[in-house]
Structures are given as C-alpha cells and as structure tokens.
Amino acid sequence: MKSIEASLEINFGDLVDNMGKLAWTCILNQFITVLVGKQPMFLQPNHYVYMTVGGAAHMNVGYKPNFDNPDPAGFPKIQFTMTGADRQPSTGPDQTPPRTPPPP
C-alpha cells in the first residue's frame, strides 16, 4: 500500500474513494435508458474508506445537595462544548497520515 501511495503521490484512502465514486457512476449509468424523463433519487457515500474518531472527556461536578429538598431545579447548570484540533500525523512506521475531509 505504501508503494502505491508513493508512486501515485496520493493517500490510499483517497484513491479508494475516487475508485468507489467511479464505480458508483458506472453503475448509475446503466440505468440511464430507463430513467429518461424521471427524477430518481440515489444516495451516494462520500467515503468508501471509513475512519474511526475517538475522544475522551472527564468531568467532575461538585455541589452541596439539599437533602431536605432534593428538587432537580437546585442542581447546578452545566454546559459542555466541544472543539476540534488538528493533530500532527504519527511518525510510527505503520502509520499513515490522517486524511483531510473532502469539501462539502
């Protein structure tokens, strides 16, 4: 796989995605004659190589509860937001740099 990436100067995942789009287009072209004058709706994936994204969050919320009146309205208000950050690609021998997502 690395030799293919090096010779084509392309990420293997991008190559598979492009080949998947080409194959999907070829399949859809087989229906052209029966779709004349109709408006079909086909779904198409934007990635054929799937990636896993992981993350972790640790939260501790402390407050002194009112045991005489355990009304949830007295619980603390918590807001949680997430932000993303680009990571540097791993330098390990078996690691491929992460792909950039295609534009919408």
Image (cartoon, rainbow, N blue to C red):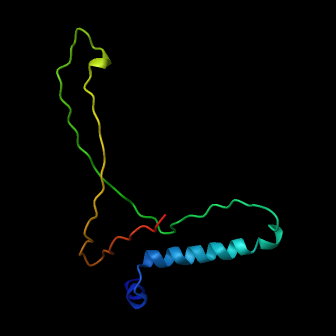
- The residue positioned 21% from the left and 14% from the top of the image is 66
- The residue positioned 46% from the left and 67% from the top of the image is 103
Numbered-mark total: 0
Q: Picture quarter containing residue 20?
A: bottom right
Q: Is residue 99 above or below residue 6?
A: above
Q: Is residue 62 above or below residue 6?
A: above
Give coordinates of residue 74: x percent, y percent.
26, 18
Between 28 and 79, the residue placed more toward the observer is 79
Give coordinates of residue 40: x percent, y percent.
74, 61
Between 95 and 24, the residue placed more toward the observer is 24
Give coordinates of residue 84: x percent, y percent.
30, 56
Q: Is residue 45 above or below residue 93?
A: above
Q: Picture quarter containing residue 75?
A: top left
Q: Quadrant of the N terminus?
A: bottom left
Give coordinates of residue 57: x percent, y percent.
26, 46
Between 4 and 80, the residue placed more toward the observer is 80
Q: Residue furthest top?
A: 68
Between 94 and 86, the residue placed more toward the observer is 86
- The residue positioned 27% from the left and 28% from the top of the image is 77
Q: Is residue 38 above or below residue 7?
A: above
